[in-house]
Image: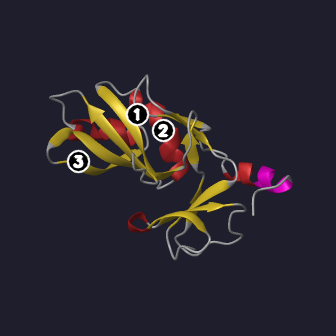
Amino acid sequence: MLFAGGEMALADGLWNGFPRQIPAGGTDGVVYELKPGYCALHGGLLPTDEAVEVFEPEGIAILRGTPPASLATGQVLSPVYGPKIGDGLACPTGQLFIRFRQGERVEAHRAELEQAGFRIAEVLEYAPQAAWLRARSGSLAEALSGVSRLRAIAGVEGVEVQFLRRREHR
C-alpha cells in the first residue's frame, strides 16, 4: 500500500532529523534525496514477503507503503533515498567512510571525531588514513546529519555515507 494523504504526513514526521538530500562522490557526484512512500526496516526478523529489497547480511529490508505500526526489540526505521537524477533506491546503513590526507592516521583524530559525535568502528589495515565511523549515539539520523561536521575537520579529504543499493548489471 502506498502512502496516501495523512499517511504521507505521518511518514514525513518519522524522518525529522534526517537530511532531505545527501551528496555523494565529491563535488561532481550523485545527490541522493529522500524517497517518499518507502522506509527501511533495520534489524530483527525481516518481512521478506513484503519487502521491495532485502539486504540479508546487513539485516535491512526496504518496504513500500506505511511503516510498520510496531517494531520488535532492536528494530529501527530509516528513510530510503534515491538518486536525484536517475532511478533506484538506496538505504543508509548508519556507517560513514572517512578519509584523511595521505600520511595522516585516523587514530590521531580520534578526539575530533568523538567531539563531532562519532566513534571509529574500523580503521582500514591497508589504509590507516581511512576508517568506517558510526554515530556515538547509534542513531541513523545523527550519523547522516553529521556529515558536514566531519567534513569540517582539518585534514579530511572525503566523507561518504554507506548506502545499500540493488545490484544492477550493465
Q: Amino acid at mark 3?
A: Val
Q: Is residue 8 magenta?
A: yes
Per the picture, the main secondary structure of the magenta-coloured stretch is helix
Task: Check disc 1 and give the amino acid type.
Answer: Leu
State the residue in front, 81 or 139.
81
Range covered by the magenta-colored residues: 6-10
**Distance Cα–Cα, label 1 vs label 3:** 16 Å
Vertical comparison of 46 with 67: above or below: below
Measured as percent of width and height from the top left, residue 168 is found at 43, 50
The residue sitting at 73% across, 48% down in the picture is: 12
**Rendered residue at 45%/67% (across/down):** 59
Camera-nearest residue between 104 and 39: 39
**Judging from the image, what secondary structure is the residue with disc 1 in?**
helix
Q: Does the CB distance between marks 2 and 1 fall below 8 Å?
A: yes
Secondary structure of residue under mark 3: strand
Q: How many marks?
A: 3
| Quarter assignment of residue 78 | bottom right
Residue 32 at what x, y percent from top left? 54, 38
**C-alpha distance separating marks 2 and 1:** 6 Å
Residue 38 appears in which quarter of the rendering? bottom right
The residue identified by callout 1 is: 150
Mark 1, Cα crowd under 10 Å, few <14 / some 14-19 / many 20+, is: many
Tag of residue 123: 3
Q: What kind of colouring is applied to the model shown?
A: secondary structure
Q: Which residue is mark 2?
A: 146
Q: Residues within 10 Å of mark 2 (few under 14, many from 20)?
A: some
- Label 2 and label 3: CA atoms lie apart by 19 Å
x, y percent for residue 77: 59, 60
Residue 7 lies in magenta, yes or no?
Answer: yes
